[in-house]
Image (tube, rainbow, N blue to C red):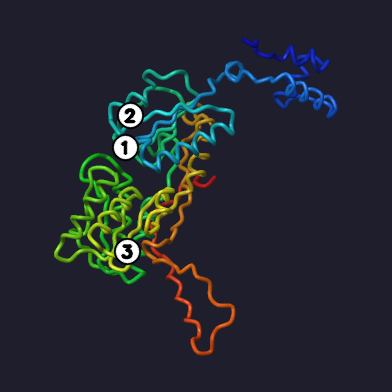
């Protein structure tokens, strides 16, 4: 087996000191351009690979960040995990991915670092843990919460404005002229605050539009899975007065709803318009493609990793909440399919071109709350 190439080997090959090689590798100190080029050529020729573990130990860190997410089979969490790994790698860190399945026991163990190696910090997306449990944490390593507000004021937290996002999605449906707008994703049990906030945003949009609320149009689910969305959509269609639009609390629920609508022969969006949340890749290629609220997943990941590396409460720094932007992406499930056939170069006098369809009205409605002084910083 070939022995590992070290700084001493590179220094001998380039004819410089070990300190000079170290300065080039770590981009420190003062090195002339000619010497830097010679050292870099030797690094490439010898196939030098830095010992990141040793470097992190010298710097007093492990180089490892744990990321605990509920379900890696859910497209949103899989896409978010990829962004977190990318952000950590760009900062010289590796990620240990842990799947909690949203179970309280698993989340509690991760929270306290049970059976985990030494970490530079933890990024946790909790579903089962409530605020008091999070606040009783005894592990002192940096912690950043994703998505949930349960630990606000104690730990660093990265999120989108779920209430505002739900209100914008619902208002979009109302602006299309839909009057029986249903909701899929309410949860009767558990501390899932995302569901609570999205339900609040849905109701706020109805109130702002003067639309009479109908609790029969609010479908509860056990989980945010495709099968739950399909079953909930079936229940709504069986109502004496079914909805003409549905806001689904995530894209997986919306994709399940689209399946049921297709099986029942219900046209989307002509009969029922559908909006989701998350902007997962699967929704872009569904038939019809899915209108959705798109959180900036890259910004979520970057903010989370940066907050972990900042150290948070472990360094006595006041906790921060970073609220990342979201965008309503309008696709076929509310706007219909746009013909792809290009217009003729010269219109025929006998058959003038049809006027362009009017643009969709802008979405409105949002949830207001007292801004955090450090948000968006």
In the depicted view, which residue is nearer to us: 352 or 281?
Answer: 352
Determine the image quadrant of residue 67.
Answer: top left
Q: Secondary structure at mark 1?
A: loop
User: Could you tell me how far apart the alpha carbons at marks 1 and 3 are, in whole angstroms?
Assistant: 32 Å
* Residue mark closest to the camera, 3 vs 2: 3
Could one spot residue 296 in this view of the protein? Answer: yes
| Mark 1 surroundings within 10 Å by alpha-carbon count, few (fewer than 14), some (14 through 19), many (20 or more) | many
Residue underneath mark 3: 268
Residue underneath mark 1: 127
In the depicted view, which residue is nearer to us: 45 or 241?
Answer: 45
Q: Secondary structure at mark 2?
A: helix
Q: Is residue 73 above or below residue 180?
A: above
Q: Is residue 361 left or right of residue 56?
A: left
Report x, y in % for residue 279. Answer: 42, 51
- Contact (Cβ within 8 Å) of mark 2 with mark 1: yes
Quarter the N terminus occupies: top right
Residue underneath mark 2: 107
What residue do we see at 23% from left, 67% from top? 212
């Amino acid at each position: 087996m070939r022995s590992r190439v070290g700084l001493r080997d590179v220094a001998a090959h380039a004819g410089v000191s070990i300190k000079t090689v170290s300065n080039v590798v770590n981009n420190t100190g003062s090195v002339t351009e000619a010497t830097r080029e010679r050292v870099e050529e030797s690094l490439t020729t010898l196939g030098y690979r830095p010992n990141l573990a040793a470097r992190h130990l010298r710097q007093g860190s492990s180089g490892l960040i744990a990321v605990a997410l509920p379900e890696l089979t859910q497209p949103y969490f899989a896409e978010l995990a990829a962004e977190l790994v990318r952000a950590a790698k760009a900062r010289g860190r590796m990620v240990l991915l842990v799947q909690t399945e949203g179970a309280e026991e698993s989340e509690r163990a991760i929270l306290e670092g049970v059976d985990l190696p030494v970490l530079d910090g933890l990024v946790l997306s909790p579903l089962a843990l409530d605020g008091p449990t999070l606040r009783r944490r005894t592990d002192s390593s940096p912690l950043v919460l994703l998505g949930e507000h349960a630990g606000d004021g104690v730990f660093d937290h990265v999120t989108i404005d779920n209430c505002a996002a739900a209100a914008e999605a619902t208002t979009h449906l109302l602006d299309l002229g839909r009057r029986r707008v249903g909701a899929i994703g309410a949860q009767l049990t558990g501390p899932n605050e995302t569901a609570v906030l999205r339900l609040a945003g849905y109701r706020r949009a109805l109130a702002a539009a003067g639309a009479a609320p109908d609790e029969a149009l609010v479908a509860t689910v056990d989980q945010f899975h495709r099968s739950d969305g399909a079953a909930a959509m079936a229940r709504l269609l069986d109502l004496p007065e079914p909805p003409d639009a549905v806001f689904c609390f995530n894209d997986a629920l919306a994709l399940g709803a689209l399946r049921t609508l297709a099986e029942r022969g219900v046209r989307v969006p002509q009969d029922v318009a559908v909006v989701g949340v998350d902007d997962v890749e699967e929704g872009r290629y569904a038939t019809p493609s899915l209108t959705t609220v798109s959180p900036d997943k890259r910004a979520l990941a970057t903010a989370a990793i940066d907050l972990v590396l900042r150290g948070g409460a472990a360094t006595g720094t006041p906790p921060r909440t970073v609220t990342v932007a979201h965008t309503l992406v309008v696709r076929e499930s509310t706007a219909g399919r746009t013909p792809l056939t290009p217009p003729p170069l010269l219109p025929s006098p006998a058959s003038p071109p049809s006027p362009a369809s009017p643009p969709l009205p802008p979405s409105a409605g949002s949830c207001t709350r007292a801004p955090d002084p450090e948000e968006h910083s």
